Image (tube, helix red, strand yellow):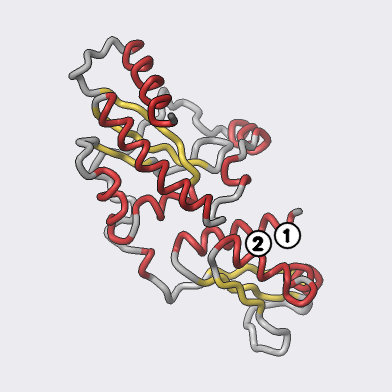
Amino acid sequence: QKEGACLGIVEKLRKLQDLLDSEIGFFVIIVPATAIPVIVGIKGATIAEVLAGTGVEISIGKENVMGMPDTPIGLEGTATQVTTAVANIHKVIQDMADRGRLLPADFKYRPDKAAAQLAAGAGAHLPEVSLPPADHDLFYGMDPTQNFRTKAKIVVDTGLAGWLIGKGGRTIREMQENSGAFLHVIREDEPTPLLKPGERLIEICGRLERKLEGIQVVLQTADS
C-alpha cells in the first residue's frame, strides 16, 4: 500500500513536469539525518544494496533541511525506478524505528530554529538550493562507521550528571538502549584534564550512527 501510494505521488509529480513514461525525472525525499550513515552502510554496502537493480542515480545533501533534523536525498529515474528505491530506503528506516534507533524527535520540525537561521541570513542571495552530484562522496573517502576508536565527549555539571545516570543507573541504561551507543560518565576521582570543579565528562562510544544517536539522546534527556 505504501509503495502504491508513493508511485501515485511520483506519477502526479511527473505529470506536473510534463514527463513521458520513459523519461528520467528528478525527485527529492527527506530522511532523518541520523539515518544517513545507516542508509549508506559500511563502505556504501547498504546503499548499493538499496539501489541494486533500480537504475536510480542518487545524491545526498550536505546539509539538513532548514529547521528540520532531516537530510534531502535526490533520486533520478523513471517513476517505477524512483518508487522502488524509495521503498528500499523506507525499509532501512523502518528497521531503525523498529529497533528503537529512531526517536519521534528525529522527525520533528523546529520552526524556532528555522526562524533563527533565516534571521541570521541563511539562504540569503541564493536563488536555489541544489543537491551535490550523484558521485558525491558523503564521507570524503573515509569509512567513519569502522572508526571504533573515536569517542564523543559532553561536559555537564555534577548535578546533571547524576540526573542523567538516574536511580540505580536506570536513566543511562534507557539512553543506551534507545541509541545503541555506549555511554560512560567519568567518575569524579578519575583524572580529567581541562574540566572545571563541579563538571563531569560523559563519553559516548560506538559506530558513527550510534554515537550520533547517543549525543542526541543525551541532549534531549538533559533538556527535558
Residue that mark 1 sits on: 222
User: Which percent across, then down, holds residue 46?
Assistant: 31, 53
Q: Is residue 187 above or below residue 91?
A: below
Q: Amino acid at mark 1?
A: Ala
Task: Give the Cα separation between the discs numbered 1 and 2.
Answer: 6 Å
Asked whether 3 or 118 is in front, the reply is 3
Q: How crowded is the residue under tag 2: few (<14 C-alpha within 10 Å), some, or many (20+)?
A: many
Q: Is residue 185 above or below residue 49?
A: below
User: Which percent across, then down, holds residue 66?
Assistant: 54, 35
Label 1 element class: helix
Specify the quadrant of the image occupied by residue 191: bottom right
Asked whether 129 or 194 is in front, the reply is 129
Asked whether 180 or 4 is in front, the reply is 4
Specify the quadrant of the image occupied by residue 72: top left
User: Which percent across, then down, holds residue 213?
Assistant: 55, 58
Q: Amino acid at mark 2?
A: Val
Say whether residue 56 is left or right of residue 62.
left
Which quadrant is the N terminus positioned in? Answer: top left
Residue that mark 2 sits on: 218
Q: Do callouts 1 and 2 mark residues in contact (Cβ within 8 Å)?
A: yes
Please tell me which residue is depicted at 46% across the width and 59% down the height of the picture. Answer: 209
Please tell me which residue is depicted at 32% across the width and 11% down the height of the picture. Answer: 15
User: Which percent across, then down, holds residue 178?
Assistant: 60, 60
Say whether residue 47 is left or right of residue 186.
left
Residue 23, labelled with which disc?
A: none
Q: How crowded is the residue under tag 1: few (<14 C-alpha within 10 Å), some, or many (20+)?
A: few
Please tell me which residue is depicted at 52% across the width and 59% down the height of the picture. Answer: 212
Please tell me which residue is depicted at 66% across the width and 77% down the height of the picture. Answer: 185
Label 2 element class: helix
